[in-house]
Amino acid sequence: MFEKLSLSGVSNIEWLRLRKSGIGGSDAGAICGVNPYSSAMKVFQDKTSEAVEEQDSEAIRIGHDLEEYVAQRFTEATGLKVRKSNFMYRSVEHPFMIADVDRLIVGEDAGVECKTTSAYNADKWADGNIPLHYVMQCYHYMAVTGKKVWYIAAVILGREFTYRRLEWDDDLIEQLISIEADFWNNHVAKGVIPPPDGSRACDEVLEQYFHTAKKASAIALVGFDEKLRRREEILGFISELQEEQKQIEQEVKLFMRDNELASSDSFRVSWKNIDSTKLDTKRIKEECPELYADYGKVSHSRRFEVRVA
């Protein structure tokens, strides 16, 4: 069972605030650790902060503007009619789960998620595949609405239109609900930051939360010796692999000599001339200190270093 909240007349800012009241479909993949562009920590930050930020990028605009086109292509390909749903759905049993769906199918207990993606991502849709974070998004919608089927339709820009059909899976949906319940009840509700996952998204969130260190402050480092030893081992492996990588590159360069391109049946290598211009900031600071002061921009960040005691 679910409750419906009308989105008719709701502004974008109000809609963004509503999204903070629960876990949406686009959050599910991040919470499950399968979204390459987000993380559980990033979702936590969004749900617990007061800030409401309207995101605007070319990719977001394309996705929004082409949503109707993707829906039309889906109807052409399948013969299934679709309609917009001007509601936000909230699970009665699990009120932390919300859904703002793209389309519902007329006459069928199903919905459709509409996507647009770059041709560079075409391989992620090859052979019937679906990016995992989109799979979790669709199953999240099924869990909230109770609908037994969800389609995902995608236009791969400049390449093709494709769609997939996902059916209700008891085990997967039960596991998804459990993961989301743990995230909401033990992290969002309690204000406890979820553990990091090594993603760039986590780096960004940590920088935002703890962007400035208290001068001369220090704490005892408890419980991290083994992990930091493992970090030293990893750095050693990386160094060895980078050296091997460099050696291979140098061998290819020696083979190419003064040629710009080289190719085989499997690879295409370029070693091109590049001209770049950089400002000599040291000289400007010495010879034109006032100019440097006027145009110099101070950036603030924290440097993370580990030294063996």
Image: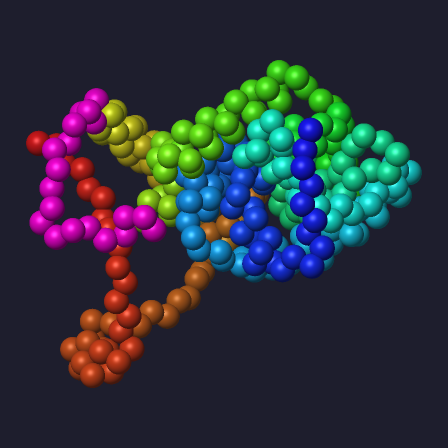
Q: Which quarter of the figure is the N terminus placed in?
A: top right
The residue nearer to you, when weighing 47 against 81, is 47
The residue sitting at 68% across, 52% down in the picture is 7
Q: Is residue 228 placed above or below 157 in the rendered structure?
A: above
Magenta-colored span: 208-226
The secondary structure making up most of the magenta span is loop
Magenta run includes residue 85: no
Relative horizontal placement of residue 200, taking residue 180 as reference (left or right): left
The residue sitting at 9% across, 49% down in the picture is 216
Q: Is residue 55 placed above or below 193 in the rendered structure?
A: below
Magenta run includes residue 216: yes
Residue 253 seen in render: no
The residue nearer to you, when weighing 44 against 118, is 44
Residue 177, percent across and down?
A: 56, 25
Residue 137, percent across and down?
A: 62, 35
- Splitting the image into 4 quarters, where does residue 55 fall? bottom right
Residue 264, percent across and down?
A: 58, 38
